Amino acid sequence: MDTKAEFDVIVVGAGIIGSLSAWRLAQEGYRVALVDAGQPGGQASNAAAGILSPSAEVDRAGPFWELTALSLEHYDQMVEELQEESGIEVDFRRSGVLQLPTLDDPGGERLHERYRWQSALNPRIRWLSPPEVAEVEPALANWHLPAIYAPEEAQVHAPKMVQAAVRAAIWRGVQVWSGTPVEELRLRPSGQVEGVQLARGAVRAHVGVVLAAGAWTGILAHTIGLHLPVEPVRGQVLGLHHDGPFLRHIVFWGSRYLCPKPDGRLIAGATEDAVGFEGRTSLKGLWQVSQALAELGLPMDSLVFERAWAGLRPKVPDGLPVLGPVPGYPGLFVASGHHRNGILLSAITAELVIKWAAGKDLTPWAAFAPERLLTR
Ligand SMILES: Cc1cc2nc3c(=O)[nH]c(=O)nc-3n(C[C@H](O)[C@H](O)[C@H](O)COP(=O)(O)OP(=O)(O)OC[C@H]3O[C@@H](n4cnc5c(N)ncnc54)[C@H](O)[C@@H]3O)c2cc1C
């Protein structure tokens, strides 16, 4: 670790958000340090199911829909470059998403209302009658349910994405410092963000600091007197296996999902628990996920349990990501609050980070700007 080296940008946090941003910054020619308290991806990003689904995750038309849809559009080209520069395949596939009605919407009226506004914004989104569902997804033939079908929505292997981003970043010259907690952000008397304080000393950045510390972002913001209300929301998932062919598509019912992976695994998720920084699984959470699978009528006997895990999602009160520079603190860009959609939103987040570094206008993205949340 060369703390005396000259950097343009220091990225704090090597989850998917920080790693991908560091790689893209380096592609643009910036000298970058990527600093993580633990191992890259070791927190929320490695826990993610890797689903990339605006239709299942966004509840109304507006800027959040646009942000998620644009991020998914970036994926094809981004993945191609990432795989080429890292040598790591990230299992990106447009496996399609089916949304089924929830138990409290048995006739699917609410689901159909959702279909009406989503299909107006994305004509590739279709409404399937129960027989059409059975045709598209034979594993669901017995349930006679309608569905929203988003055929181009996708998934990746989230831990491989982080690994690829870090490897590509290193290949581009980024210095990656693992096991290196940032103790505080450092300010000049003018309020300009100067860099970060590590146990081994201060490190400076000429352009600024990208704060991408996931659920820990608020703690670091506090070191310069900013109240940024990022809270951890624990998500618990089950890793399952089914012998022989089963699901082809990612299936959502409400916020619950089952995601088939190319290697035959299935990820079932996920809880949303307000339990502070407790990152272990609980029996209650695993029971809740199992119960949701049972409600859907899935063949519980033939779903083999492999393992369970949890991660802490970063969330702010309005549930939207926090993306942008901080007024009064030149040189600071916050990239956090991605809650359930950090993998999906990583592509567009990295693009906004690059625009910020280049001094470009971010007002089209004002809905996500930090000032909506800040108090000093
Ligand atoms: C169970 C589960 C399933 C999910 N499924 C999906 C999904 O299918 N699709 C999707 O899009 N999203 C999903 N998500 C959400 C997604 O995982 C998160 O939104 C995303 O990982 C957030 O990324 P991040 O880089 O901001 O945070 P993290 O991955 O948590 O990374 C933050 C990093 O900051 C580091 N850090 C913290 N403090 C410091 C410090 N002081 N100094 C230096 N480094 C520090 C941490 O060590 C950590 O590595 C899921 C989340 C969970 C928990």
Image (cartoon, rainbow, N blue to C red):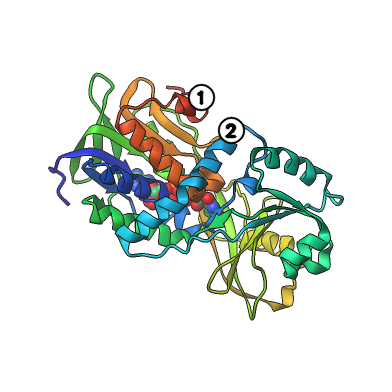
The reply to whether residue 41 is in sight is no
Judging by the rendered image, the residue that carries numbered circle 2 is 318
- In the depicted structure, whether residue 177 falls above or below residue 333: below
| 10 Å crowding of disc 1: few (<14), some (14-19), many (20+) | few
For marks 1 and 2, give the CA distance: 10 Å
- In the image, what residue type sits under mark 1? Arg
> Which picture quadrant has residue 29?
top left
Contact, mark 1 vs mark 2 (Cβ under 8 Å): yes
> Left or right of 300: which side holds 163?
left
The residue lying toward the viewer, choosing from 149 and 288, is 149
Label at residue 372: 1
Residue beneath the point at 73% across and 77% down? 301
Q: Is residue 87 above or below residue 243?
A: above
Mark 2 nearby-residue class (10 Å; few <14, some 14–19, many ≥20) = few
Q: Which residue is drawn at 27% across and 40% down?
A: 10
Per the rendering, the mark at residue 99 is: none
Among the 4 quarters of the image, the one containing residue 249: bottom right
Amino acid type indicated by mark 2: Asp
Secondary structure under tag 2 reads loop
Ligand 1 within 8 Å of disc 1? The answer is no
Residue 85 appears left or right of 146: left
Residue 231 x/y as whole percent: 51, 40
Residue at 56% across / 56% down in the picture? Answer: 154
Q: In this view, does 320 lie above or below 13?
A: above
